[in-house]
Image (spheres, rainbow, N blue to C red):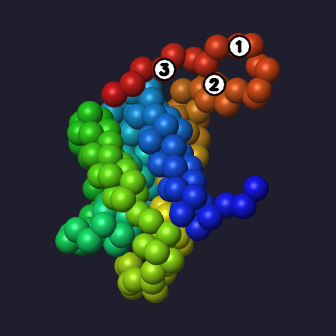
Amino acid sequence: MRTTNRALARQLVAEARHSLEKVYLPRITRCLGMLSDEDIWWRPHPTSNSAGNMVLHLAGNVRQWIVSGLGGALDVRQRDEEFAETGPLPRRALAARLRAAVKEAGRVLARLDASELARERMIQGFRVTGCKAVFHVTEHFAYHTGQIIFVTKLKRGEDLKFTRLPGDKRKSARLPAV
């Protein structure tokens, strides 16, 4: 079977959207629902970031790289402020900010075609293709999702049951959402 550039572009974008919207975002919002306000802003060390900082950082990254970088919106990101925040910002506000960024990114991604994925542009001072930007955001989101999950497991002392292998009969845990 021969895959066209158009079909490959659609598949890449669909996989990225699925990962952002259906895998990582729900896991982060569930973790926010399980953590206390204090735990959301807890830093294990002064040079570390809290789960709250990571949520702000992800929202900023998605907006800068996808919504602005690929979608053409004005880049208004204040990256240093994402890490300087010490909270507490309400968990619902954090979750809403991240959901909005992912939703906006989804709309931009849905409009991308093969030529847009191949085209180079400058994002955050880097010369990248649209494809590289999509990979960067998806990979970056996965990385910080793992950190937020780790903090949640550390603070809660329990398995969050996010992973089910094919054939696993146990049900996924119903975790509080925000």
Q: Where residue 149 sits: x, y (%)?
A: 55, 39
Q: Where is residue 94 in the image (x, y as percent from the top left)?
A: 29, 42
Which residue bears the numbered disc 1? 170
In the depicted structure, whether residue 113 falls above or below residue 148: below
Query: Label 3: few (<14), some or many (≥20) within 10 Å?
Result: some
Residue type at the position of mark 3: Leu
Residue at 27% across, 46% down: 100
Q: Count neighbours of disc 1 (C-alpha within 10 A) and say few if under 14, some if 14 to 19, many if 20 or more.
A: few
Specify the amino acid type for callout 1: Arg
For residue 175, which numbered disc appears in the image? Answer: 3
The N terminus: image quadrant = bottom right
The residue tagged 2 is: 161
Secondary structure of residue under mark 2: loop
Q: Do the residues labelled 2 and 1 touch (CB within 8 Å)?
A: yes
Q: Would you call the spot at circle 2 few (<14 residues within 10 Å), some (14-19), or many (20 or more)? A: few
Q: Which amino acid does label 2 sit on?
A: Lys
Residue 46 in percent (x, y) is at 44, 59
Q: Which of 14 and 152 is in front in this view?
A: 14
Q: Which residue is drawn at 47% across and 48% down?
A: 17
Left or right of 166: which side holds 80? Answer: left
Q: Label 3's element?
A: loop
Residue 81 visible, this angle: yes
Mark 3–mark 1 CB contact (< 8 Å):
no
Q: Position of residue 31 (x, y in %)?
A: 46, 33
Marks 3 and 2, how far apart at CA: 9 Å
**Label 1 element class:** loop
